Amino acid sequence: MRKQIAAANWKMNLNLEEATGLLKNILQAPLQLLPGREVIFAVPFPFIPMAAEKSVGKNNIFIAAQNCSNKKSGAYTGETAAFMLQSVGVQYIIIGHSERREYFHETNAMLAEIIDQCFLHQLQPLFCCGEPLSVREEGKEMDYVARQLAESLFHLTPEQMQQVVIAYEPIWAIGTGKTATTAQAQEMHAFIRQQLEKKYGHHIAQSVSILYGGSVKAANAKELFSQPDVDGGLVGGASLQAAEFITIIQSLD
Ligand code: PGA
C-alpha cells in the first residue's frame, strides 16, 4: 500500500536555536509511526545537518530540502546542487512549490530538470502542483494541473515515477487559512491519480502518495486525510508549532 506522509515545510522561518528546539519537541512525542507512515521535515538549507543528525536512527523520519538547482555543479553563485544535498543527509526535495514558481519564476520545464538531478543522486522528489484562484474560478483547474504533471513528471520511467510523492496545493489555500473542502481535495486527488493511471497504469497510480497542502492544521487534518485519495499533507504554518504538527502526524490514516 502507498505511504501516508506528514511533511513539514518550514519555509524561510526560524533561527538555528528555534529550529533545534522545534524539532526536538516534535521528535520527543509519541508519534506512533507504524510501517507505511512517514514524517518529512523540509527545513531551510542551514539547518539540514542539524536535522539530519537529530533524525539518525529514528524510523520513518526523513529530511527534505525546499529546493535544489537544475544545474549539476559549477559557476552558479547562490545555488545548491542535488549531490551536495545528498551528501548532508537529505532524502527528499520539495520541487515546484507555488512560491518558487511565482517569486523565482520556476517553469514546468525547469522543474523537470531539477527532478532529473534528484534521480541522479538518489533523492526523492516531493513534487508540488496546484492552480491559482483565477484558474479555479474559470473552471480550468484540472487542465492546469494535468499540464503541470505532463510537463514536469511524465518523462520519467515507471520505476522513477513510483518514487515521486505528489503534493496538490491549491494556491488560493496556501497560508490563507482557506482550506479546500474535503470534497474539492478528494476530487483533484482522484483526478491526479487518474492521470497517473493513464500514463503509467493502475499499479503505479495506486502506489504514488498524493498529499494535500494548503492551510492543513490539527483541526482539519483527520477529515482531509480520511479521503480515499488523500495520503497525508504538506504543512506550512501549522508545522511551526510542535503541538499542532504532532496532532497532524497522529491524524495520518
Ligand atoms: P500552509 O502552507 O500550510 O501555511 O498553507 C502549505 C505549503 O505552502 O506547503
Image: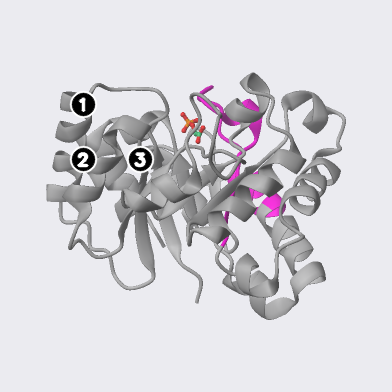
Residue 108: x and y in percent read 75, 40
Residue 7 seen by the camera: no
Residue 8 vertical position relative to residue 198 in the rendered view, above or below: above
Q: Which disc, if any, is residue 218?
A: 3
Looking at the image, which residue sits at the far bottom? 203
What amino acid is found at the position of numbered circle 3 in the picture? Answer: Ala
Q: Of residues 96 and 204, which is closer to you in this image?
A: 96
- Determine the CA span between mark 3 and mark 2: 26 Å
Residue at the spot of label 2: 50
Residue at the spot of label 1: 16
* Residue 183 highlighted magenta (yes or no): yes
What amino acid is found at the position of numbered circle 1 in the picture? Answer: Leu
Q: Does label 3 or label 1 sit earlier along the sequence? A: 1
What residue span does the magenta drawing correspond to? 164-188
Which residue is rendered at x = 14% and y = 40% of the image? 25
Q: Does label 3 or label 2 sit earlier along the sequence? A: 2
Q: Residues within 10 Å of mark 3 (few under 14, many from 20)?
A: some
Residue 67: x and y in percent read 51, 37
Dot 2 and dot 1 residues touching (CB under 8 Å): yes
Q: Does label 2 or label 1 sit earlier along the sequence? A: 1
* Residue 212 highlighted magenta (yes or no): no
Quadrant of the rendered structure where residue 34 is? bottom left
Q: Of residues 115 and 120, which is closer to you in this image?
A: 120
